[in-house]
Amino acid sequence: MEILRVENLNFSYPLRKEQALNDISFNVKEGEFIVVCGESGCGKTTLLKLIKRELAPCGERSGTIYYQGIQQEDLDDRTSACKIGFVMQNPENQVVTEKVWHELAFGLENMGLQTETIRRRVGEMASFFGIQNWFRNKTDELSGGQKQILNLASVMVMQPELLILDEPTSQLDPIAASDFINTLYKLNQDMGLTILMTEHRLEEVFPIADRILVLEKSRVLLFDEPRKVGEKLKNIGNNGVAKGLPSAIRIYQGLQNNSVCPLTVKEGRECLAKNYTNKIRTLKREKRCSPAAEPAIELKNVWFRYLRESPDIIEDLNLTVTKGEIVCLLGGNGSGKTTLLSIIAGSNRPIGAESRFLERIFANIRAGSCM
C-alpha cells in the first residue's frame, strides 16, 4: 500500500531565481526503506522538510504531496505531528528539555496523553534503544551519538508510520553512525516502519535500502533499486553523484563487462575474482622516512575537566608527537578528541602544574621556534 506520493513538486526560495526543486515526482510504499542522495545543494533537505508540513520552508511551491492518499493540506494537525516523524541533521537542534526522561515524554505531554500511557511508551522506547543507563542524565552531558539516539527515540515514542531523517549521521563518528544505521534497519525490519532518509554515508545504507532516489540539479535523475541505480549510473557516465557511491559500485563502473552490480565490499571482491582471475597483484609497500626524534608536541600527565564538579574529560594523558609525524586521533563521541586538540592549541588549559609546561611549549610555537 502506498504511504506517500509526491506529484510534480516545484519549490523556490524567496528572492531566488533558480528553483530548489523542479518537477519532483515519486511514491513510497509502506515498509520501504528509501534513501535520497545527490550532491550538496540538489534539494534533498528542502524536499524532506516540505514533506513534514510543520518544517516546510517559506517560498513559492506548486505540486501535491499525499500521505495515505490524503492531500497534505487536508491532514489534521494530530496526524501530521504524530504519524510523520522527523530527525534533524544536527543532534543539538532537536533537544528541547534538560533531562533525558523528560525529552522522551515531551511530545506525548504536548499531545495530552494520560500519565499511564506516557510512562508505558517512554519505558518501552528507553528499553528498545538501550537508554536505561542514562535515563535520568542531563541532556547536555550526552555525547553526539547519544543525543541522536535520544532524538530518534523521542520521535519513535510518538509511534510514527513514516520516519524522515535528514543526514542523521553527519555529526557522528563512524562507530556511532554504524550503530545508528543498524538501529534504523532494525526499526524497518522488526516494526515495518517506513523510512525516507538523506545520507552521505552510502557505503552502509545502499545495501539495506529498497530503492534509491537520486537527485541532480533539483530534479529526479533516478529512482530504482540500488543495483539498478549503480548499473544506470555506469551507463550515464561521468556524474557528480557517482563520486559518493559505495566503493564496490565505483570499481564496478570502471570495469569493462556487464556483470551484476555489487553493493558491498564482499560482492565487489567476488566480482573482481570472477572477471579478472590471476590479474590482481599485491603492490610493494613504499618505504617512508622515519620521523625525527625531536618532539614537536609533548604532553605529560595531563588532566582536564570543564567544570570543578564535572567528571574528568582527560585523565592522566601522555602524548608525544615528533617533527614530521602524522598522528590521527580516534575514539567515539564524547571520548575527548576535541578537548585534547583544544588543550594542544592552547584554547583550554589543563589542571595542575603541567599547564606551566604547556605554556612554555605554546610560547615557542607562537615564536616559530618549535616547528
Image (tube, rainbow, N blue to C red):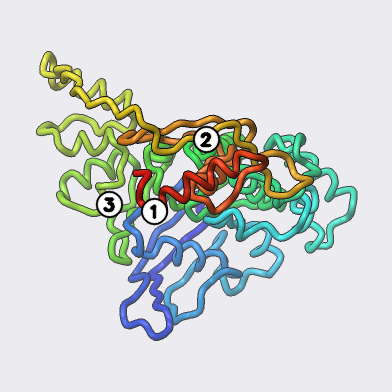
Which residue is at the front of the view, 216 or 94?
94
Amino acid type indicated by mark 2: Leu
Secondary structure state at the residue bearing disc 1? helix
Q: Which residue is label 3 attached to? A: 241
Asked if one can make out residue 188 in the rendered structure from this viewpoint, the answer is no
Secondary structure state at the residue bearing disc 3? helix
- Please tell me which residue is depicted at 39% across the width and 33% down the height of the picture: 295
Q: Which residue is label 1 attached to? A: 367
Which residue is at the front of the view, 96 or 26?
96
Question: Which residue appears farthest toward the top when viewing the image?
Answer: 278
Amino acid type indicated by mark 1: Ala
> For the residue carrying disc 2, how many other residues have a C-alpha within 10 Å: few (<14), some (14-19), or many (20+)?
some
Callout in the foreground (2, 3): 2
Earlier in the chain: of badge 2 and badge 3, it is 3
Q: CA distance from mark 1 to mark 2?
A: 19 Å
- Picture quadrant where residue 190 is located: top right
Q: Which residue is label 2 attached to? A: 299
Question: Which residue appears farthest toward the bottom when viewing the image?
Answer: 15
- State left or right for residue 321 relative to residue 282: right
Residue 294 location, x and y as percent? 36, 31
Which residue is at the front of the view, 316 or 280?
316
- Please tell me which residue is depicted at 22% across the width and 26% down the height of the picture: 288
1 and 2 marks in contact (CB < 8 Å):
no
Residue 325 location, x and y as percent? 33, 33
Earlier in the chain: of badge 1 and badge 2, it is 2
- Picture quadrant where residue 264 is located: top left
